[in-house]
Amino acid sequence: MSGHSKWSTIKRKKAANDAKRGNIFTRLAREIAIAAREGGGDLDSNFGLRLAVDRARAANMPKENIERAIHRGTGDDKDAAAFEQVMYEGYALHGVAMMIEVITDNRNRTVAEIRHLLSRAGGNMAEAGSVAWQFKRVAYFALPAAGVDSDKIFELAVEAGADDVTVGDDSIEITAPVEAFKSVSDRLTKIGNKPTEAELRMNPTSVVELPPDQVLQVMRVIESLEELDDVQRVYSTLQVTDEAVALLEKA
């Protein structure tokens, strides 16, 4: 998983320095609005909303933007566009399966953009259910490894219900059942270890291993998808290698 971790770090740094920061805030605002619509505007009782707001704060999203997004989701903003959360399925080149999470106010536009991008890159959209079976929804956490007692983190995570703890040179990754998300999160917070990533994600049940140059090709397709305004996240069966990440950094 070290390649995945380094790739995530690169993407976070790029996002932090992105000239199109407004686009990042737009995506975060949509995520907040969806969470508020589904579970209400109270951060204490709506864990999904608290998670979305935490991500927005980590990206330095202004407080007024966050509050506006919550009001949009709860229906207090009558002029706001109606968004819906959708998961599309598809394939990149070299047979890599993908789950593409979007929040959109126009499905036709979003599908057309994704289909066009995939077709141009040698991939294609897939029928609903034809890809989803290759993924499992999990709770995921990543935190810096520097200055951290990895044995203590391991014990804490397992006691909280985690399935897997991977200790790398740069980061510690924790995977747990969805229902253990709050337990793991609360225990990490209690000992003062704030994760750099904390989310519910779709993890592949098996991965596709490719040569570094082909891995890089697929990584670029995924990055292009993530740059679309309506796309929130892209999950794939690609095994990201350190060699491919090194090529990406040089590109």
Image (cartoon, rainbow, N blue to C red):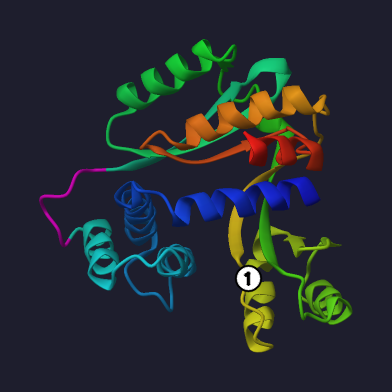
Asked if residue 251 lies left or right of residue 86, the reply is right
Residue at 70% over, 24% down: 96
Dot 1 corresponds to which residue? 195
Q: Is residue 141 left or right of residue 31?
A: right
The amino acid marked with disc number 1 is Pro
Residue 238 located left or right of residue 234: right
Q: Position of residue 1 (x, y in %)?
A: 80, 49
Q: Is residue 234 visible?
A: yes
The one of 163 and 170 positioned closer to us in this rendering: 170
Q: Residue 210 versus residue 247: which sits nearer the camera?
A: 247
Point out the stretch of residues depicted in magenta: 76-82
Q: Quadrant of residue 37?
A: bottom left
Percent across and percent down for residue 74 are 25, 61
- Position above or below: 42 against 245: below
The residue shown at (70%, 31%) is 133
**Which image quadrant for residue 33?**
bottom left
How many numbered badges does the structure rendering display? 1
Question: Looking at the magenta stretch, what is its main secondary structure?
Answer: loop
